[in-house]
Image (cartoon, rainbow, N blue to C red):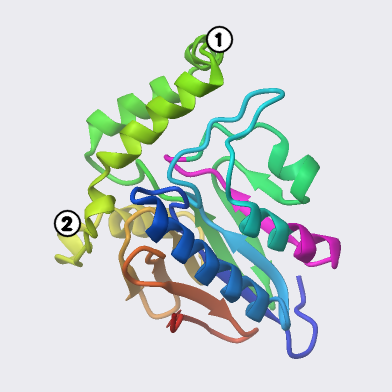
Amino acid sequence: MKLPANKKIYFASDVHLGLYPEDKSKEREKAFVKWLETVRKDAAAIYLLGDIFDFWWEYKKVVPRGFVRFFGKITEITDAGIPVHFFTGNHDMWARNYFTQECGMIVHDGILICEFNEKKFYMAHGDGFGPGDNGYKLLKIAFRSQSLRWLYSRVHPNLAISIGHIWAKKSRYSNGLVEKFEGEENERLIPYSKNILKQEHFDYFVFGHRHLALDYKLNEKSNLMVLGDWITLFTYGVFDGEKMELKKWDI
């Protein structure tokens, strides 16, 4: 894809809308909507790399209440012809077709490879990537089980979504956790990306999930970009056609 003149690609992740407490979530939703309104002015596309919601369970005829500011702004943007790409994360992997049919977003459930101005991008939410974390990897398989999802969908929405909200209240992020970079040996996304580079070149690996704003040089031509979050960091990525940078939104 060749970017039009003066256009940019924007990236964000881990907004966790609906995260307890509710009043703080609404404040962050307003801030994120303001960011969306600002970047749409020169956006060629917007990529939301997962965990935009702290919990999302979508029935065939029912979706969780709330988030009207976010959905309204996204629909404005897609109606204006600006593509918005939504990656399912470990907190909102249970999306069905609401985001696509009602809001016009393009939904990705896994890895997406793109090329912008001859720069190759490897994008995903990033949960369960790299060595270790075997307990979560098993849990992820269970979460994605079609049989278990069908069974949970038999639960009345009031109860099923309440269970999700209880889970959200126990999230470590509701306590304002700030992740820290503790060296290459402790950052699973680094060996994961380096292993991919043994097979194929990418200029940028772009991930969410880690709640860490990280621009890490993998080799002379490749960078790992971890987007941070919109709980404590309020960071995002922007590609201007030549290079990608991490920036902070002033709320």
* Nearer to us in this view, 146 or 152: 152
Label 1 Cα neighbours within 10 Å, binned few <14 / some 14-19 / many ≥20: few
Question: Residue 166's x, y, as percent?
Answer: 33, 32
Q: Amino acid at mark 1?
A: Arg
Q: Residues within 10 Å of mark 2 (few under 14, many from 20)?
A: few
Query: Which element type, helix, strand or loop, lies under badge 1?
Result: loop
Residue 163, position as x, y percentages in the image: 38, 25
Q: Report the residue that reaches farthest toward the bottom.
A: 6
Q: What residue is rendered at 51% in x and 65% in y? A: 12
Q: Is residue 205 left or right of residue 228?
A: right
Res 198 visible = no
Q: Which residue is mark 1?
A: 154
Foreground mark, 2 or 1?
Answer: 1
Q: Which residue is mark 2?
A: 186
Residue 37 position, x and y percent, is 67, 75
Q: Which residues are magenta?
A: 75-91
Splitting the image into 4 quarters, where does residue 60 fall?
top right
As for residue 83 lying within the magenta part, the answer is yes
